[in-house]
Image (cartoon, rainbow, N blue to C red):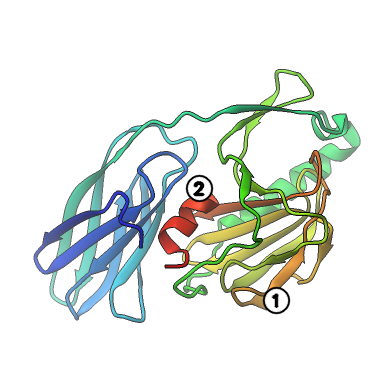
C-alpha cells in the first residue's frame, strides 16, 4: 500500500494502520487491523459511517473507508472495535481531512441531456432508484483479489470532482469519476474480480456497467459503445466488460470510471494509488 497518510495506533493487542494517497474529500483510506487470534469481528467508525472489516487471507482485518466527494474538511474521531471471545477492544485515533479545491469545466452537450423532456422523467427516476438500490446492497463477501488494474491504458484527462457547467448555463454537477480519453472501440478491462450488477443503457450515462467487487466496493463504467458482459456475470481482473464509446451525456468517445466505497464517491485514481500494482 502507499505510505501516503500512513498512521499507526495500538491498544490491548490490536494494531491499526491506515494508508491513503491523501486525506482529502474523494480519497480512499484503507484500515488494516492486526487483532488477537480469537477475534470474531472488527468494525471501523470513521467519517460518520460504521464499516465492517473483513479478514484477509493473511489473517489481518481490512476495512475500506471512503472520504466522500462532498465531505467537509475537519478532524474526524475514529474508533476501531474488535470483538474477541472474551472482550471488546476499542482503539481510538482520528483522521484529519484537509480541504480540497475542485476546478470548474464548461461543456457543450445535447440539450435534452441537460434539461430532459417530461417524457423521460419517469425513466430517469426509475434508473436512479435502481442504481441507488445496487449501491445499497453490496455483496457481503470480498470478491476482489489484492491488486487493482487500470481498465484502459490511457491516462485520466478529466479530474474527479470537477464542477461541470453544461451549455453555458447555471446548472452544474460534480464529476464523480475519472475520464480516460480512449478511442472508440477500445476494450475496457474489469479492474478486479466481482459480479456484474448492471449492464444496460441509462439516460445520462449511456451504456453502463456496474461491477460489485464486494466489501462495499463498486466500479461503474459509462458511455460504452458495446457490452461484453451481462447482468449476473462473474468477472476476473482483466476480463473485457465492454468497449469505449460516446453514449449518453458526452462530448466525444471516452471511458468514465466511477468508484463507490461503502457509499462514498471516491476518485478511482486514489483506489489505484493504495490498492493498485506495486
The mark closer to the camera, 2 or 1, is 2
Residue 81: image x %, image y %? 23, 60
The residue that label 1 is drawn on is: 233
Residue 229: image x %, image y %? 76, 72
Quarter-wise, where is residue 162 in the image?
top right
Q: Which residue ends up furthest to the left in the rendered image?
A: 12
Residue 165: image x %, image y %? 70, 25
Residue drawn where x is 51% and y is 52% of the image? 269
**Up-down relation of residue 217 to residue 147 (above or below):** above
Residue drawn where x is 47% and y is 28% of the image? 101
Quarter of the image for the N terminus: give it.
bottom left
Q: Secondary structure at mark 2?
A: strand
Tell me which numbered mark, 2 or 1, is placed earlier along the sequence. Answer: 1
Residue 248: which numbered mark, if any? Answer: none
Residue drawn where x is 47% and y is 67% of the image? 277
Instruction: Determine whether, in the image, residue 171 is placed left or right of residue 176.
Output: right
Quarter of the image for the C terminus: give it.
bottom left
Instruction: Determine whether, in the image, residue 20 is placed left or right of residue 176.
Output: left
Residue 274: image x %, image y %? 41, 59
Q: Secondary structure at mark 1?
A: loop
Residue 266: which numbered mark, if any? Answer: 2
Instruction: Determine whether, in the image, residue 232 is placed left or right of residue 49.
Output: right
- Label 1 crowd (10 A; few <14 / some 14-19 / many >=20): some
Tell whether label 1 touches label 2 (CB within 8 Å).
no
Quarter-wise, where is residue 238 in the image?
bottom right
Amino acid at each position: 500500500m502507499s505510505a501516503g497518510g500512513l498512521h499507526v495506533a495500538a491498544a490491548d493487542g490490536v494494531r491499526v494502520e491506515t494508508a491513503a494517497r491523501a486525506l482529502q474529500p474523494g480519497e480512499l483510506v484503507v484500515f488494516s487491523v492486526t487483532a488477537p487470534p480469537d477475534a470474531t469481528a472488527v468494525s471501523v467508525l470513521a467519517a460518520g459511517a460504521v464499516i465492517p472489516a473483513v479478514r484477509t487471507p493473511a489473517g489481518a482485518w481490512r476495512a475500506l473507508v471512503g472520504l466522500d466527494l462532498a465531505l467537509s474538511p475537519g478532524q474526524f474521531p475514529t474508533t476501531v472495535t474488535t470483538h474477541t471471545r472474551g472482550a471488546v477492544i476499542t482503539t481510538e485515533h482520528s483522521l484529519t481531512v484537509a480541504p480540497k479545491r475542485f476546478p470548474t469545466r464548461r461543456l457543450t452537450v445535447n440539450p435534452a441531456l441537460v434539461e430532459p423532456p417530461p417524457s423521460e422523467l419517469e425513466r430517469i427516476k426509475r434508473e436512479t432508484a435502481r442504481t441507488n438500490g445496487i449501491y445499497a446492497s453490496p455483496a457481503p463477501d470480498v470478491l476482489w483479489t489484492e491488486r487493482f488494474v487500470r481498465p484502459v491504458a490511457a491516462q485520466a484527462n478529466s479530474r474527479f470532482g470537477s464542477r461541470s457547467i453544461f451549455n453555458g448555463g447555471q446548472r452544474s454537477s460534480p464529476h464523480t469519476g475519472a475520464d480516460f480519453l480512449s478511442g472508440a472501440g477500445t476494450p475496457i478491462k474489469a479492474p478486479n474480480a466481482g459480479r456484474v450488477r448492471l449492464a444496460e443503457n441509462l439516460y445520462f450515462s449511456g451504456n453502463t456497467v456496474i461491477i460489485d467487487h464486494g466489501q462495499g466496493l463498486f466500479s461503474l463504467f459509462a458511455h460504452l459503445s458495446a457490452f461484453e458482459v451481462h447482468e449476473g456475470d462473474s468477472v476476473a481482473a482483466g476480463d473485457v466488460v465492454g468497449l469505449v464509446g460516446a453514449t449518453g451525456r458526452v462530448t466525444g468517445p471516452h471511458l468514465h470510471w466511477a468508484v463507490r466505497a461503502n457509499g462514498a464517491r471516491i476518485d478511482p485514481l486514489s483506489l489505484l494509488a493504495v490498492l493498485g500494482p506495486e
